[in-house]
Image (spheres, grey):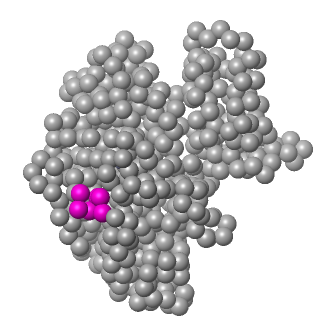
């Protein structure tokens, strides 16, 4: 399906698509999905076998609800298929000669998995990246600094979306922070994309070097992705006050697209590229949909990706969504929050605890610097969690009073009774990429 984009100067604002009714969205998605299932079935031996086993054919899908009859696929299967047939595996629905680009996951858990794109996939991807950037207020007069890793990382090429939109793009990549600050200053970049932890770190580094980001740099929009922090208002506010800039959270997935969703100027959830990726939010235990607005595991289905369709891909991300129209006029579904990875969810004496919930509480309290970590331990078969949080410079309140206040607030918000240790300013290490904030001494693992 070709989407008609509107006229000159506003090429990436497409009201016919972006403001259509929910019924129109659903019928568009149904038409795309029916066609996509035919493509997956015809091109990929793995999907043919998987559909056969589940007793479904592409024709079984008469409504979007029928998707629930189709089998899931997960990261482990992607890995296995890739090992069985190097590079593309039997999940690919096109021959290798049609593939023009591959990304690979960062490989933080297990073997990196490859994600292939045809020329059409790549172009369509950059088109909707441009649409997301436009919704976040990026314009052709902006100077955009892309500070993400280019080495096989699917976040790298997202810069091309900003380039399509007409912004002047600076492909900075990941360089030492002093160099990046020099680039931002030299080019007077107006926008940057990085992780929330790094935006924070970079702002603090600038101040330590005598650079006031608000006065000496021109950055007014900061795009962030890769960590839950971008969805947490308290984290965004801290970064914003350092930089004098607005923070826009983006969400992407290495196995699908660099960004599948991004915040518009209203910054009330992340607009989903609903014409490219269909979402389900399911109870991870039962596989049944949760009511709108509630937390569940995000399951994604590509709608147009030719090279390797993903049908009902279990992301392991715990999210919530709304399909209420946004104040900006767009009607696409909005991702309200990424609350964490299913793998990161801690269960403390029967209560689910996401590190992102702790982060929100710590960052609401202005007497703390916002840096924190969680230590989880097990004594006599009972789990306990200690939140170590840094006091801010110049705060004179007694540490015991600070600790008691944070303990009360954590209990009220998360339901977990955590001990709090107040640390001196600057005693926790600063993250330069993805922050490691959980020291799980039950397993010896460090996670986000
Ligand atoms: Zn909006």
Q: Is residue 83 magenta?
A: no
Q: Can residue 316 be seen by looking at this rendering?
A: no
Q: Position of residue 83 (x, y in %)?
A: 48, 71
Residue at image coords 67%, 66% = 285
Quadrant containing the C terminus in the rendered view: top right
Q: Is residue 16 magenta?
A: yes
Q: Is residue 308 above or below residue 16?
A: below
Residue at image coords 12%, 47% = 9
Front residue (pair 143, 360): 360
Q: Can residue 112 be seen by looking at this rendering?
A: yes
Q: Is residue 212 above or below residue 311?
A: above
Q: Is residue 431 above or below residue 445?
A: above
Which span is picked out in magenta?
Answer: 15-20
Q: Is residue 94 left or right of residue 105?
A: left
Q: Is residue 225 left or right of residue 219?
A: right
Quadrant containing the N terminus in the rendered view: bottom left
Q: Is residue 377 above or below residue 200?
A: below
Q: Is residue 338 left or right of residue 136?
A: right
Q: Position of residue 440 (x, y in %)?
A: 70, 42
User: Which residue is outermost to the right?
Assistant: 380
């Amino acid at each position: 399906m070709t989407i008609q984009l509107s006229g000159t100067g506003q090429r990436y604002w497409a009201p016919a698509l972006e403001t259509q009714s929910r019924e129109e969205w659903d019928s568009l998605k149904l038409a795309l999905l029916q066609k996509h299932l035919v493509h997956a079935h015809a091109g990929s031996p793995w999907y043919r076998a998987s559909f056969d086993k589940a007793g479904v054919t592409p024709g079984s899908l008469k409504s979007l609800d029928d998707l629930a009859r189709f089998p899931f696929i997960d990261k482990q299967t992607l890995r296995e298929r890739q090992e069985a047939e190097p590079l593309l595996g039997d999940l690919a629905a096109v021959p290798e000669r049609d593939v023009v680009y591959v990304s690979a996951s960062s490989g933080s858990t297990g073997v990196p998995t490859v994600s292939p794109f045809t020329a059409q996939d790549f172009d369509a991807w950059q088109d909707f990246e441009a649409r997301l950037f436009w919704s976040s207020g990026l314009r052709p007069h902006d100077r955009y600094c892309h500070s993400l890793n280019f080495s096989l990382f699917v976040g790298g090429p997202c810069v091309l979306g900003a380039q399509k939109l007409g912004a002047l793009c600076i492909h900075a990549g990941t360089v030492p922070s002093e160099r990046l600050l020099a680039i931002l200053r030299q080019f007077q970049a107006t926008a940057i994309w990085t992780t929330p932890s790094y935006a924070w770190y970079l702002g603090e580094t600038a101040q330590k070097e005598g650079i006031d980001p608000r006065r000496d740099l021109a950055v007014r929009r900061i795009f962030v992705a890769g960590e839950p922090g971008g969805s947490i208002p308290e984290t965004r506010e801290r970064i914003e006050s350092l930089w004098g800039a607005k923070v826009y959270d983006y969400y992407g997935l290495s196995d699908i697209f660099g960004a599948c969703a991004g915040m518009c100027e209203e910054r009330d959830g992340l607009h989903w590229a609903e014409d490219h990726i269909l979402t389900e939010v399911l109870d991870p235990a039962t596989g049944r949909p949760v009511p709108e607005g509630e937390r569940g595991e995000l399951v994604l289905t590509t709608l147009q990706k030719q090279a390797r369709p993903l049908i009902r891909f279990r992301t392991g991300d715990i999210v919530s969504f709304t399909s209420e129209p946004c104040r900006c006029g767009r009607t696409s579904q909005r991702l309200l929050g990424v609350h964490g990875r299913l793998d990161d969810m801690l269960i403390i004496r029967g209560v689910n605890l996401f590190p992102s919930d702790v982060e929100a509480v710590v960052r609401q309290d202005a007497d703390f610097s916002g840096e924190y970590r969680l230590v989880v331990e097990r004594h006599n078969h009972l789990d306990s969690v200690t939140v170590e949080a840094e006091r801010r410079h110049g705060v004179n309140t007694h540490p015991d009073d600070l600790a008691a206040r944070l303990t009360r607030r954590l209990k009220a918000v998360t339901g977990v009774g955590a001990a709090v240790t107040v640390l001196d300013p600057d005693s926790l290490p600063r993250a330069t990429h993805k922050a490691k904030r959980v020291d799980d001494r039950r397993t010896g693992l460090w996670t986000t």
